[in-house]
Image (tube, rainbow, N blue to C red):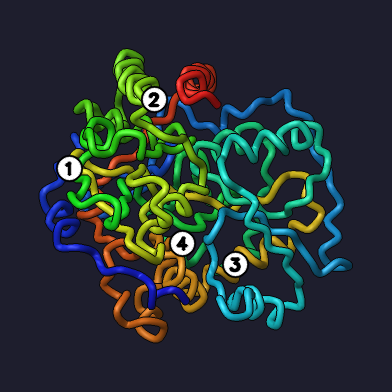
Amino acid sequence: MRSSSRKPLSPEAKALLDVMPTRRGLLRGVAAGGALALTGGALAACGTKAKNPTSSASSAAPACTVTDVSAQERKLVFSNWVEYLDLDEKTGKHPTLDAFKAKTGIDVTYREDINDNDEFYGKIRAQLADCKPIEPDLIVFTDWLSARMIKAKQVAKFEPTKVATFQKNLLPSLKGRSYDPDNVYAAPWQSGFTGIGYNTKVVKTPVKSVEELLTRSDLKGKVAVMTELNDTMGLILLSLGKDPANFTSADYDAALEKLKKAVDSGHIRRVAGNDYLQDLAKGDIAACIGWSGDVLATEGNVEYVIPEEGQLYWSDNMLIPISSTHASNAMSLIDYYYDPKVAAEVAAWVSYICPVAGAQEAMKAVDAELVEDNFIFPTDAELAKAHPFMTVDDDVRKDYERKFRAVIGA
């Protein structure tokens, strides 16, 4: 559990939560980094009604038939992002995984080898398309890529009887997402916000906005932005007064030009994946675009700021690759992590938004100080002030990615 190193929400951040503007009406785009809309006082995950990715999945994709050997081989490989699971820092072990093995007899090889959605997907895409096995039996990808994989029929379908706890305890706000309306392909691992992180030892004046991050003279050559298009471009769109959930190609190009100016001038030192944290903690960069849980849980002189323009909201999901030969074992692991007590243990360490109903109550026995933590258990009103990123057609997305990669040199 990592709560001992976790910093409380600063008064400045609390104040920004109260004054951030609400979204303009109901958002009907499945967030590439989260898909929530305010409906009748309760949050409901929803998406573009004109096109349901699951129903429009390519009919030409060949059927993938795989023999599940879970009963004979009580094991699986789980690929995840860095520092995204509870850790005993003395032993280097993950307590909840050890408890899972003791409970089920299933051995888990856990790897923190996902640094960027596109980068990791690029390593496995060809094999999945040909129904060839890849090593991970469980992977964690952000909403937009989860939707793409489901549409391409590269994800195994859950068996309801094997994920009953997941079906029961998934937060209502995350049920019925348009790319997975029946909750049978993608199980949210954690959700989170994207905002600004800065090192208080290097930066004496807090970085309050995206505009400051990209233009303040004292930050020149000391700023990092993310390789994730949604995070970087979403915040820059907000800095231009545009809604990341509803923008035009012209809006995108304007935001891209703002990013290009900051890159070409040397204001931005580097473009980083999940490895930005080390540079921030060491002071090699002074400020950056960062994920809430990462920044809040980082030891040292590091603070998370909700930008004055607003922050982004997204979810990462557990997916079983279609060619996995240990799919049943993977479903057992998914179901296990939807036990509220287990979910609370993970949430206390990773500091992200917990997707499991009942985990807030269970947190009382884990760390009572975190029960009212708004970055783990945000209220519906607080979530309504965050912004998802608009889902676009694959061709448009590829064009956006091409332009973005050209600017950041990736």
Kind of residue at disc 3 = Asp
Q: In which quarter of the image is residue 162?
A: bottom right
Left or right relative to 213: residue 283:
right
Between marks 1 and 2 in the image, the one whose residue lies nearer the viewer: 2
Circle 2 residue = 263
Mark toward the viewer: 1 or 3? 1
Secondary structure type for disc 1? loop
Q: Which of marks 1 and 2 is nearer the N terminus?
A: 2
In the image, which disc is placed on residue 141? none
Q: Which of marks 4 and 2 is in front?
A: 2
Which badge, 4 or 1, comes first in the chain's sequence? Answer: 4
Rendered position, 37 above or below 381: above
- Label 1: few (<14), some (14–19) or many (≥20) C-alpha neighbours in 10 Å: many
Nearest the viewer among 150 and 213 is 213
Position of the C terminus, as image quadrant, is top right
Determine the CA span between mark 4 and mark 2. Answer: 41 Å
Residue identifier under label 1: 308
| The disc label shown at residue 335, or none | 3
The kind of residue tagged 2 is Val
Camera-near label (4 vs 1) is 1
The span from disc 1 to disc 3 (Cα, nearest Å) is 38 Å
Residue type of the residue flagged with mark 1: Glu
Q: Which of marks 2 and 3 is in front?
A: 2
- Residue 76 seen by the camera: yes
Q: Do the residues labelled 2 and 3 touch (CB within 8 Å)?
A: no
How far from the left and from the top, in percent, is residue 228? 47, 36
Q: For the residue labelled by badge 3, is the local secondary structure a helix, a strand or a loop?
A: helix
Mark 4 or mark 3, earlier in chain: 4
Tag 2: Cα neighbours inside 10 Å, few (<14), some, or many (≥20)? Answer: many
Residue 367 relative to residue 278: left or right: left
Q: Residue at x 50, y 37 (%)?
A: 144
Residue underneath mark 4: 170
